[in-house]
Image (cartoon, coloured by chain):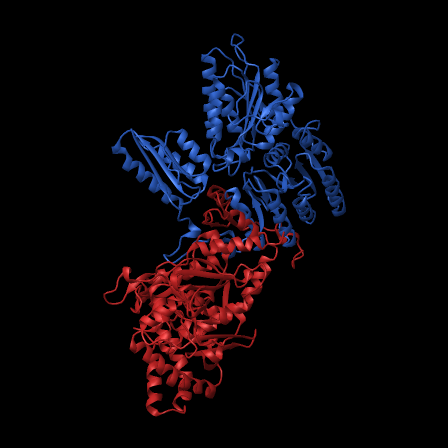
Amino acid sequence: MTASGRPLRGLLDTEPVVATAGVSLLADALRDQAVEVTEAEWQPPLPGAERDLARVMGDPRRVAANAVAFERMTSAHAALVDVVPASEALGLERGTFLHAGPPLEWDRASGPMRGALIGAVLFEGLAASADEAERDLAAGTYDLEPCHQRGAVGPMAGVVSPSMWMYALHDDVYGNDAWCSLNEGLGKVLRYGAYGPEVVERLQWMTHVLGPILRQAVRTTGPIDVRSVIAQMLQMGDEGHNRNRAGSLMLLRELLPGMITADASSSEIAEAVRFSGANEHFFLNLGMPACKLATVAAEGVPGSTVVTVMARNGTDFGVRVSGTGDQWFTGPANTPEGLFLGEYGPDDANPDIGDSAITETGGIGGFAMAAAPAIVRFVGGDVPFALRATRTMYEITTGEHPSFQVPILGFRGTPTGIDVTKVVRTGILPQINTGMAGRVAGTGQVGAGLVTPPVECFRAALAALAAAVPA
Amino acid sequence: MTTHVELRRGTYHDSVSLMQVSRSVAGTDGVTAAQVAMATELNVDVLRGMGFDVPDEASPNDLVVALRTESDDVLPAALAAVESTLAGLRGRPDTGGGEDEVPPRTVGSAARRSGATLALVSVPGPHAVTEAFDAVDSGLSVMLFSDNVSVEDEVRLKDAAAAADVLVMGPDCGTAHIGGVALGFANVVRPGSVGIVAASGTGAQQAMCLLDAAGVGISHCLGVGGRDLQAVVAGRSTRQALRALAADPATDGVLLVSKPPDPVVLDEVERYAAALGLPVHWAVLGAGRPDLTEAVEAFLTGQGVAVPPWPHTPAPREDSALSRGTALRGLFCGGTLADEAMTVAEAELGGIRSNIAHSADLRLGPDLRDEGHVVIDFGDDGLTRGRAHPMIDPTLRMERIAVEASDPTCGVLLLDLVLGHGAHPDPADELADAVRSARRAAHDQGRAMPVVVSLTGTDGDPQDRSRCEHALASAGAGVFLSNSQAARHALGLLRGTA
């Protein structure tokens, strides 16, 4: 019995309101009787998935498990609490390098990933030349590990070495920590695979000047509520992945008093402030670990079909799902489509790369595109496209985020908690906004655009979820 | 002659809509054959049978457009007709809206948008259970029209439904009435106080139409699926339905229409109903039991209602100079009606060959042909994979009627026709034409071809039963509201005593 006390939720007490999937004629027959009908535009699921789908849909744990995962994902907090070297934050040993996406070997690494690794080896002073760095990397001298394995995330190539400084974020609700490197700005930068002298030089300056100043600023100001900045920036035209303008300004506003009173020379402080203020993506490296804290809170709920990681290493796209823990499901990364910088064109673009799809996993980025109609100037498409993108994502997500809202959709919460079963049922793939790295090592950024994961990830995840359903 | 075969990847439309597209395109000037269909195994066989060369890589998720035209010049017009009819299938009022609107893609999404209380799922069988779980999880009762759902999935689904306090009607549930709304294939019957619980779709339609003809109305008709009263499903939905009907102020008693239930389940359901204080009358179909008409008559008598003469028109006498075949040929769309006719006929004729035969040795081969007595259920799972139910798409049965017309062993043709919402909008005229040409073809060959139609429906139905009876009688068929009377009349014609 339900609260109304009427059996079958009062089915026999009123004229039914009907939702249909399948033969349109049967919906028409209801309309002929003036019955309110909503017809799903149903299409067959991804080929061959029907047995796994039936199995997982019939898992009695699924609904409650997804509710738990969604509740955790949307209630996790994220505060910037410190800025620390990776060696300290992650226990990263000299000679170990983190990278974006699922696990990867040098042999299969793409141009920008190789470039970023070479740059990091040079930055750490482990090799005297790019050739030497490449030779050592190819020889397996160094250990490569995904950022996600250590609770970190990195944009684009996402390469992290022990001397780099990291933002440290903490969630006091679920007690988790997450880390992300500092943003280097745009142009020829390590994360896009550039490793020239100016790149290494900038990394040195970030380690010796920017990192310590930011640390003093955070420690002076006290924890900064990053989740609250995300909620605000979505109402100021950002989507938190490819557009971070409002978020970056709000972050700078928080940090500025602590930065200018930091114990450093006035010229160093001026340069740190100028560098941070000039960077439109200053906030991205905080939005990402904030989303990581949200998604990590949702991990490990048995029976849950909610995606907790989407990440790309430039070769493979990988996803992880709450109900299957830290297992990766991978497929070949697609190449983004969008707008190119300068003379670059589609042939110059590398396949999809970076941990930044954690933003979409957490319900912002491409999923919040309706909040950022101006983004279409940057990634292509028109304004209705941006609205449609967000609306479409509701078809594959578990719920609407209680704090991240989209004004133009009547302050509807962003679509949050990608559900593997819904992706496989509808064939709708998560919409990811992304930067594009040059295919050739050392090139840097060539454009920005839109990309989707390969379907294989979700088919494989579904198969594993089906196998995990108790008999 | 120009042949065009085209595969469209990832384009999906339901089989009924595509049947309408095919028909519409086939009606274009200069088009000699048109088949627009999903490339299911069955449809690919049909297309190849029509002489179309379907690429091997075609999968059930691909749309095939196959056209044959008199000349090259006609092809562009035919393709344009395909485009415009396909385009007409989309853009319904609830999926339209602005250019940034997105239609719901799952039952759960559709339900959230409208606050739906009931889901009607009719997607192809292998996918149906997924949509049904989605509906149950969204707090909706489900009418699961789809067939080809495994019994294991059915049990899991019904357990989830019980936990969520919703009802799963089905699988393979053809008919339901809830709160005055007819769902699926359903006749327009008068409102009243009899609740119907139906483990059989056309059986329930027949019972409701008989009650209606006797002036007795129904409160609701809840389908439970043909297997619900078998041991493995153990009356899961029946109990839910009885509990709801017991609490319904409009319902005084229940008529439960089912194939023979498992004795243990029967006992449990009876005790359950007794505890609810709900009078339940059983109309159980099967050999050695009263047929459905007799069960309804007993129910009416028990209610103190006079049993009326059931509407009928006897078949006209055939010229005695004509030769006569000796075999009964029953061609049905309704499964329960086919089964009942077979049961009635077997009492007199012995074992009847069928695709739903009562014993394995009587099962028809894949060609569905035999020289002796035959009853075919064209609505059976095996004949509906990848195509619409024969109540919507009568093509296969129409073809078979023509075959019987030139078969000297065919002694009498017994057909059913079920009217109501969801069924073909004008099935009687089409069937009457087929009857007329079948009889003419047989007469031309010097053979008698008596035809009897079991016509389930009411005058309130969109097709109007009286009008349909007249159309069929004019074509030379005997017509009966009572399915068992139709079967008995056919047997009389076979004996030469009717």
Colour seen for chain B: blue
Q: Residue furthest top?
A: B321
Q: Is residue B477 left or right of residue A159?
A: right
Colour seen for chain A: red
Q: Count the labels in the image.
A: 0
> Which quadrant holds residue B269?
top right
B43 to A470, vertically: above or below: above
Closer to the camera, A95 or A44? A95
Closer to the camera, A308 or A348? A348
Residue A455 visible from this viewpoint: yes
> Which quadrant holds residue B253?
top right
Q: Position of residue A386 (x, y in %)?
A: 37, 62
A295 to B193, vertically: above or below: below
Q: Residue at x 49, y 17 (%)?
A: B407
Q: Position of residue B418 (x, y in %)?
A: 54, 32
Image quadrant where one finds the N terminus of chain A? bottom right
Q: Is residue B20 left or right of residue A49?
A: left
> Which quadrant holds residue B371?
top right
Residue A194 visible from this viewpoint: no
Q: Position of residue A3 (x, y in %)?
A: 65, 59
B209 to A31, vertically: above or below: above
